Image (cartoon, coloured by chain):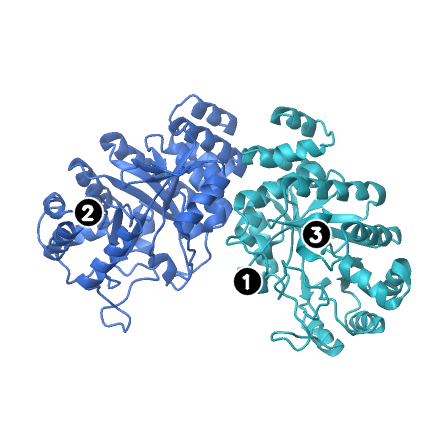
Chain colours: A blue, B cyan
């Protein structure tokens, strides 16, 4: 099927299959993808608002049993710069976040071998007793690990964590949801079905989640499209994903090495995700991996959300990429692109529109 | 004039007016600008994107001018001031890789070197590297050298050409509007004088580029006016090869601005330049200032040239530029290819050296 016919299908609000998605990625030029993605975005978000969240990433540890080859952040337990944050350190970071108008903390490790479900139950409940803040934490890999360690089911682990205060689950660790790729880049991490299972169970329990994709390592274009279709299939069942967030592999300081995906690849894949994921409300631009300029341009390539102010970010920074953006910069860059900026919460409710 | 009328004008190859240019700058439709600019670019250059293997040499940062947007210039004896001798320059040139075809040489206006020094520098470089094209001296430097030589512009340029000068870069144009220019760089030659230097250079057969510094205190009208004045001169001489919009970098300058130009502004400015400058063959994205990412995306916004390997440029770096000092030929080729375009290595005057099919 030619690009024109695929574009017509999209205009008629028809779903694209994997072959059509792949044809777009292979044959459509950058502007064509942007134009089609822009029309889909307009259908979802006619209001010309671009949202962002004020939050902080808190990486409670960098000790990790997974040791993924694309990761520059993890350390062995006996490494001189291995750490586990103390309760006091975590609380101080949360206080600072709230002082800056933050509504969410995103806590992720390291999958630490000694930290079990009790540790997180205790941590979350004590956070909730001290602060009013959304706990958007623990990726599927961490949840799977604590469930196995406690010898309980994923559902049982999620129920306990939710009861302790876990509100929602970030979509990290999805990488590429195809085992051929996972076996090469993250052989110790859960496989794609288990990632999906954690998300499905969480969504059944009423916990919102996001979904990510890390591309630009060893995957093929077919596998990128398959990743999107697999997410779309689960979303048809559950409607539990709030947003999709593609970002690029950052090869600095990693075992895997190589060169990063280019800006044109990023914008094409971002556009394709907006087109393929017809049951996702929100597509997030990644200024953390792309920088402010391309993240702004991404608003014309299907993105309607600018992600987070990320008062703190450690994982991408460990790969030598350290873009920083203040709330003010995010607001002014959204305005410069002709959109109205709005602070949102984790579930994409608008908290404050910036005039 | 609405966007549809402008679109019709572009598609039927009609020249855009000042009002059209202003309307395009106020448009929010970035992809439409990309579409129209790509249309113009493909008519001129098909899907070719040019680059050159070059080396930048900035012989001194001593400068008698004090432009407020500049983080590079120094006074004699000031911390960070430097000057290269002719020997230093020749030594640097000797390190140029085997594929290098161009020296890009621009400097501050040195307070006390005589005109003969510049002729010696050119001759020494030509002696060392006879096959490498020397693109040197902005119009501002040419005006300064003419004052040193006392020969007038034309004879100064003839003497420099005789000594080895091959063409002129496009720097020092900044923004032509006299009010903005006075506020930014009161000591620098006027816009009229800049254009006069170029007209005379073109008249004796020296090609040049043209630039515009944007993202400081200028208005949209100033930008469009700048483009139209370049277009008018180009109608008369045909001597400009490429137009290069330069995004302002504020760090360490006297112009207080907290941020870099935005991605939108960079892409719009490049696209509108392509649309307004219908008599320029090439629009160049200067990756040293724009970054590799915007440079690559700009190939869908009317750009057909990404400058070159550069090798150690110092001027942007001192104003907070974030790119590495150089890119290899292979990196440039990859960047172009992954944008779906055809890389063409060129020399300074756009003779094709090699095409990557």
Q: Local crowd at mark 1 within 10 Å, few (<14), some, or many (≥20)?
A: some
| Residue count near mark 2 (Cα–Cα under 10 Å), binned few <14, some 14–19, many ≥20 | few
How far apart are the two marked residues, 3 and 1, measured between alpha carbons?
30 Å
Which residue is pictured at 27% across the width and 30% down the height? A236
CA–CA distance between discs 1 and 2?
44 Å
Q: Position of residue A208 (x, y in %)?
A: 23, 39
Badge 3 sits on which subunit?
A: B
Label 2, on which residue? A132
In the rendered image, which quarter is residue A280 located in? Answer: top left
Residue farthest toward the top in the current orientation of the protein = A12
Report the disc number at residue B324.
1
Q: Quadrant of residue B321?
A: bottom right
Q: Which residue corresponds to the image point at 63% horizontal and 32% vertical from the top-left? A: B23
Rendered location of residue A73, percent (x, y)? 32, 62
Look at discs 1 and 2 and give the one toward the viewer. 2
Q: To which chain does the residue with label 2 belong?
A: A
Label 3–label 2 contact, CB within 8 A: no
Viewer-nearest of labels 3 and 2? 3
- Residue bearing the label numbered 3: B181
Indicate the secondary structure of the residue bearing disc 3: helix
Residue B356 location (% of width, % of height): 64, 50
Q: Quadrant of the N terminus of chain B?
A: top right
Is residue B147 left or right of A74 when viewed as pictured? right
């Amino acid at each position: 099927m030619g690009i024109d016919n695929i574009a017509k299908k999209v205009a008629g609000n028809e779903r694209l299959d994997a072959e059509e998605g792949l044809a777009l990625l292979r044959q459509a030029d950058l502007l064509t993808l942007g134009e089609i993605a822009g029309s889909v975005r307009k259908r979802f978000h006619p209001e010309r608002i671009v949202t962002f969240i004020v939050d902080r990433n808190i990486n409670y540890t960098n000790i990790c049993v997974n040791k993924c080859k694309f990761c520059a952040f993890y350390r062995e337990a006996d490494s001189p710069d291995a750490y586990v944050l103390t309760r006091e350190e975590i609380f101080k970071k949360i206080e600072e976040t709230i002082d800056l108008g933050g509504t969410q903390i995103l806590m992720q490790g390291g999958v630490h071998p000694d930290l079990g479900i009790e540790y997180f139950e205790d941590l979350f409940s004590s956070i909730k007793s001290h602060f009013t803040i959304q706990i958007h934490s623990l990726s599927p890999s961490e949840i799977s690990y604590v469930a196995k360690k406690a010898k309980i089911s994923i559902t049982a682990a999620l129920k306990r964590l939710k009861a302790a205060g876990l509100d929602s689950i970030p979509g990290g660790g999805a990488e590429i949801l195809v085992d051929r790729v996972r076996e090469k880049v993250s052989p110790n991490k859960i496989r794609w079905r288990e990632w999906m299972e954690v998300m499905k169970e969480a969504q059944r329990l009423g916990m919102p989640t996001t979904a990510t994709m890390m591309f630009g390592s060893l995957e093929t274009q077919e596998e990128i499209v398959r990743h999107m279709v697999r997410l779309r299939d689960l979303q048809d069942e559950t409607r539990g994903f709030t947003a999709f967030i593609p970002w690029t592999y950052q090869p600095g300081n990693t075992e895997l090495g190589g060169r990063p995906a280019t800006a044109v690849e990023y914008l094409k894949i971002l556009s394709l995700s907006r087109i393929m994921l017809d049951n996702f409300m929100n597509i997030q631009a990644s200024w953390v991996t792309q920088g402010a300029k391309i993240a702004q341009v991404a608003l014309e390539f299907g993105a309607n959300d600018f992600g987070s102010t990320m008062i703190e970010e450690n994982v991408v920074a460990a790969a030598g990429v350290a873009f920083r953006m203040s709330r003010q910069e995010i607001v002014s860059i959204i305005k410069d692109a002709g959109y109205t900026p709005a602070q949102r919460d984790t579930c994409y409710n608008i908290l404050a529109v910036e005039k | 004039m609405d966007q549809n009328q402008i679109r019709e004008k572009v598609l039927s190859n009609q020249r855009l007016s000042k009002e059209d240019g202003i309307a395009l700058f106020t448009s929010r439709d970035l992809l439409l600008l990309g579409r129209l600019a790509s249309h113009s670019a493909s008519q001129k250059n098909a899907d070719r994107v040019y680059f050159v293997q070059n080396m930048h040499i900035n012989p001194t940062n001593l400068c008698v001018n004090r432009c407020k947007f500049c983080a590079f210039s120094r006074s004699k004896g000031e911390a960070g001031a430097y000057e290269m001798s002719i020997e230093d320059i020749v030594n640097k040139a000797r390190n140029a890789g085997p594929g290098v075809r161009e020296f890009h040489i621009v400097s501050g206006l040195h307070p006390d070197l005589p005109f003969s020094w510049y002729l010696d520098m050119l001759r020494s470089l030509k002696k060392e590297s006879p096959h490498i094209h020397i693109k040197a001296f902005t119009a501002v430097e040419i005006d300064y050298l003419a004052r040193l030589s006392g020969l007038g512009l034309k004879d100064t340029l003839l003497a420099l050409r005789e000594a080895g000068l091959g063409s002129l870069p496009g720097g020092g144009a900044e923004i032509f509007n006299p009010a903005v220019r006075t506020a930014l760089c009161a000591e620098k030659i006027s816009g009229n004088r800049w254009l006069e230097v170029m007209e005379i250079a073109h008249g004796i057969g020296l090609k040049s580029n043209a630039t515009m510094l944007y993202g400081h205190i200028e208005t949209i009208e100033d930008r469009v006016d700048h483009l139209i004045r370049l277009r008018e001169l180009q109608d008369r001489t045909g001597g400009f090869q490429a137009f290069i919009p330069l995004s302002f970098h504020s760090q360490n300058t006297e112009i207080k601005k907290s941020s870099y130009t935005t991605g939108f502004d960079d892409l719009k400015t490049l696209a509108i330049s392509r649309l307004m400058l219908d008599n320029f063959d090439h629009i160049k994205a200067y990756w040293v200032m724009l970054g590799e990412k915007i440079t690559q995306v700009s190939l869908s916004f009317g750009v057909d040239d990404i400058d070159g390997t550069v090798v150690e440029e110092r001027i942007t770096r001192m104003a907070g530029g974030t790119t590495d000092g150089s890119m290899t030929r292979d990196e440039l080729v990859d960047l172009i290819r992954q944008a779906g375009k055809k890389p063409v290595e060129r020399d300074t005057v756009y003779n094709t050296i090699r095409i990557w099919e």
